[in-house]
């Protein structure tokens, strides 16, 4: 397919020139056009099943493993990180469409007050200076396109922020408890008509991290002590809900850790 975002990048360059009143010639745009002509290649991944499916969730679950393999194949032969941004499913003579957002459109901070938000922004430089490695892990996790892996990576960020080196899941949860923050996930999906209530996000992401890091394939048996099979199946089918929550927990942990460092420095 035609390369993606090519024209948008050129438009932003034009906007930059116009905003700052910089002059440019047609030859400049032609050069930019040439430079970006192959930027972000796009291809189809087609999956066909002979199995009869009446439920879109079951079909998504069936094909997801094969799609992930296809993306890994593309990564191997292209040296790039494939990112899916659109799905079309034809099932039982019906066609359904689904956007797969490359970036989250909105940030849902776990803190509430304006004072806390301003404090987080004003102290961002201190967070960068004092928690540089944790931020590097966070940066890498944000770029991960597989939401299951993203959850595991965000848990590693929490391990680093909280300086956990033993029983990390307990350590991370204790960190939030001491700061009067609840890391549990509560979520309502009105489209799918499904509610998640009091989900132990840290424990689940911690198990994901432990199992995936050691090469295991995730299965419900690893999680049955802490979550119902229905909630597990929902999270595996919609892992972006957990990864968004884990990202917010990381941001909150950065904020809380910075407050701790400031309090220790003032003593």
Image (cartoon, grey):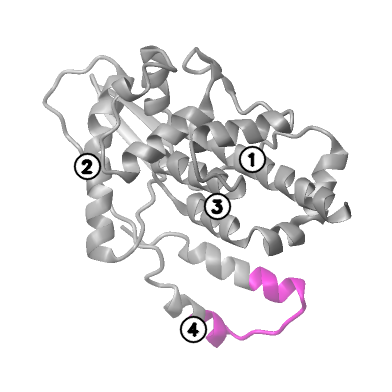
Q: Which residue is mark 2?
A: 46
Nearest-to-viewer mark from 2 and 1: 1
Residue 109 in percent (x, y) is at 70, 37
Q: What residue is drawn where x is 48% and y is 47%?
A: 102
- Give residue 232's quadrant in the image: top left
**Which residue in the structure is indicated by mark 1?**
106
First in sequence, mark 2 or 3: give its number.
2
Question: Which secondary structure, mark 1?
Answer: loop
Q: CA distance from mark 2 to mark 3?
A: 32 Å
Circles 4 and 1: CB atoms closer than 8 Å: no
Circles 2 and 3, Cβ within 8 Å, touching? The answer is: no
Between the C-alphas of marks 3 and 4, the distance is 35 Å
Give the side of residue 148 with respect to residue 56, left or right.
Answer: right
- Residue 38 at x, y = what percent? 37, 70
Q: Is residue 37 visible?
A: yes
Q: Residues within 10 Å of mark 1 (few under 14, many from 20)?
A: few
Give the structural element (helix, strand or loop) at label 4. Answer: helix
Q: Which SS class for mark 2?
A: loop
Q: Nearer the viewer, residue 264 or 252?
A: 264
**Residues drawn in magenta:** 14-31
Label 3: few (<14), some (14–19) or many (≥20) C-alpha neighbours in 10 Å: many
Q: Is residue 189 visible?
A: no
Query: Relative to the observer, which residue lies in front, 15 or 206?
Result: 206
Q: Is residue 57 above or below residue 157?
A: above
Contact between marks 2 and 4 (CB within 8 A): the answer is: no
């Amino acid at each position: 397919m035609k390369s993606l975002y090519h024209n948008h990048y050129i438009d932003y360059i034009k906007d930059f020139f116009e905003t700052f009143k910089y002059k440019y010639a047609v030859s400049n745009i032609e050069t930019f056009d040439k430079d970006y002509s192959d930027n972000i290649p796009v291809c189809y991944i087609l999956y066909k099943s002979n199995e009869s499916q009446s439920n879109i969730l079951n079909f998504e679950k069936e094909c997801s493993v094969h799609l992930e393999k296809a993306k890994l194949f593309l990564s191997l032969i292209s040296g790039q990180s494939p990112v899916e941004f659109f799905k079309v499913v034809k099932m039982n003579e019906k066609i359904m469409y689904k956007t797969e957002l490359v970036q989250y459109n909105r940030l849902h901070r776990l803190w509430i007050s304006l004072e806390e938000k301003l404090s987080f922004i004003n102290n961002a430089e201190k967070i960068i200076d004092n928690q540089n490695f944790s931020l590097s892990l966070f940066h890498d996790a944000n770029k991960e396109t597989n939401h299951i892996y993203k959850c595991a990576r965000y848990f590693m960020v929490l391990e680093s922020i909280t300086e956990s080196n033993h029983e990390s899941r307990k350590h991370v949860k204790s960190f939030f408890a001491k700061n009067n923050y609840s890391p549990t996930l509560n979520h309502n999906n009105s489209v799918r008509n499904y509610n998640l209530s009091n989900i132990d996000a840290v424990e689940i992401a911690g198990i994901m991290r432990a199992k995936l890091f050691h090469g295991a394939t995730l299965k419900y048996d690893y999680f049955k002590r802490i979550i119902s099979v229905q909630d597990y199946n929902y999270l595996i089918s919609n892992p972006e809900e957990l990864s968004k929550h884990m990202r917010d927990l990381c941001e909150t942990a950065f904020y809380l850790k910075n407050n701790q460092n400031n309090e220790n420095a003032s003593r």
